[in-house]
Image: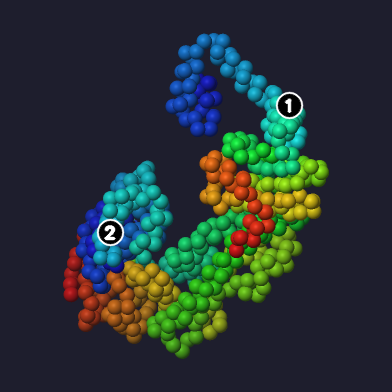
Amino acid sequence: MHLKNLHLVHFKNRDQADLEFVDGINCFVGNNGVGKTNLLDSIYYLAFCKSFFNPIDSQNIQYDEGFFVIEGTFDRNEKDEKIYCGFKKGDKKQFKRNKKNYDRFSDHIGFLPLVMVSPADTELVYDGSEVRRKFVDGVISQFNSSYLDNLLKYNKAVSQRNALLKKMGEEQRWDASSVEVWNMQLLQYGQPIYEARREFLDEFIPIFQQYYNLIGNESEEVSLVYKSRLHEASFEDLLQQSEPKDARAQYTTVGVHKDDLKFEIKGHPLKKFGSQGQQKSFLIALKLAQFDFMKMKKGIKPLLLLDDIFDKLDKNRVKALMSLVSEHHFGQVFVTDANKTRIQELFEDIDTALRIFEVQPNETKLITEK
Amino acid sequence: MEAVEQFNTLPGIGKKTALRLAVHMLGREKEEVEAFSRAFSKLKENVTFCKECGNISDREICDICSSSRRNRSVICVVEDLRDVLAIENTQQYDGLYHVLGGHISPMDGIGPGDLNIDNLLTRAQNGETEEIVLALSTTMEGDSTNFYLYKKLQPFSVNVSTIARGVAIGDELEYTDEVTLGRSIVNRMPYESSISRKE
Ligand SMILES: Nc1ncnc2c1ncn2[C@@H]1O[C@H](COP(=O)(O)OP(=O)(O)O)[C@@H](O)[C@H]1O
Ligand SMILES: [Mg+2]
Ligand SMILES: [Zn+2]
């Protein structure tokens, strides 16, 4: 699958753009703040119906303008798919495939698989467990159709049970029959979530390890660990055991909503003990593993957007990564870098179709083509 | 206009329709309009809830509960009046009802104590009840309420069943079409088998 062309009007700092891409490597080079990441974000929009960075559509309209348009033609299974996303202040966002409006954006998401590797991924290292669960859930729900439904229902059951615990706490009583009802719902939806996560991570972690060995330093022992109290005992028993604790806390203290994906280096938290370079390699390996996983499950190579990944990665790692690109392990790739010379050197003797665009404040120029 | 605002508070009536209705009422005879407003005033005054089943009634015991033609050994448990009407419309059910007045939902502040449950447990032990059919909505809250009632009914010698909802997809009883709903009432199944089917 690849994006053939992109047409933008008033999207973020891009007033107008009309770009033609190759089914290979497409690079955006230019000074910081010039709009390279914004171009990637517009491509992200076409796949996910929203920005990678800013969920508020109106803030993605160019300052002082009233609307934005993003249009792109994809070649997907040898068929042209024209995707249109338009947003006008005060109106509903329009999202179309081949001129036909979507009723629900969720019908589109997943149709054009895409993986974005971004400096913003560091939130996966620094933020709470919620962003890591979201990462895992996002990957699983792309191929397991009942997963998202179970997740929504599970979360609702947690909210209901928490409301019950709070009320009982306030009234200083314990109503076992009512608690049991919500325990049953948690089990019904939580158990399949746990199993899906375990199955996924069993497959995913080795892929991640391979990538880290390639782009990180093999002597550093890193690991990705699925943490869940459900490893210790059955969910049913855990719920039973934690009832006194739940009663005191007035919320549900055990369950898959407490799961985490631990990032470790030599058995220690990556957040505290990893260097910036190690953290970066870790996150890139994580995202590339996501790419492989989606490719395997969907049978389509996702678009790969690599935003500023060459900073802080040494030359050898970059070379190793680029060899994968030239072996056609990836499909279409978009790369941004502030360093034009680095990019030109890097891709000098790569045997893949290549286009380098220089992004300037008012235009985006094709400067190299191979 | 005050009348427009009042019409507008009704479900499904927007501003435009409210205005149209008010204009229409203006065109009617004075007596007719008064008959209208009398009927509305009386609506709330005369309506009570049946002491047996909790359904809306204008007498202490409702028509269904006091009918000699109904099968008194079966009680169908529903959330509200609309469900009774929906099931009656199928003409496939001749037992009694029990109206809970909603479903358990702690987030909305509704616990078992807020529903007409104690009365149901009393009816389960009245000697003539043999089967209790749980027919709550297929939402998570409906499911939870079914499960709660099932547990509470276990000590009594009544069979607990549930309507075969495999046929109706999701949603509230009220919106299921008549034929499907009728069929699912006829083909009800033991409650145990409905929970063991879930993984
Ligand atoms: N809605 C918007 N309208 C105009 N400019 C915007 C808007 N949103 C962001 N920008 C500008 O885009 C620039 C950042 O672009 P970005 O793509 O991140 O640059 P880089 O080339 O460094 O990746 C900033 O100067 C920012 O002010
Ligand atoms: Mg950038
Ligand atoms: Zn009655």
Q: Tag on residue A81?
A: 2
Quadrant containing the N terminus of chain A is bottom left
Label 2 in the same subunit as label 1: no
CA separation in Å, label 2 and label 1: 66 Å
Chain at numbered mark 2 = A
Q: Tag on residue A6?
A: none
Circle count:
2
Chain at numbered mark 1 = B
Disc 2 vs disc 1: Cβ atoms closer than 8 Å? no
Of tags 2 and 1, which is closer to the observer? 1
* Crowd around label 2: few <14 · some 14–19 · many ≥20 (10 Å): some
* Residue B9 or residue B143, whichever sits in front: B143
Residue shown at 35% from the left, 53% from the top = A60
Q: Residue A74 appears at what percent x and percent y? A: 27, 62
Secondary structure, mark 2, is: strand
Q: Residue furthest front?
A: B69
* Residue B171 or residue B164, whichever sits in front: B164
Secondary structure, mark 1, is: loop
Q: Which residue was labeled with disc 1?
A: B59
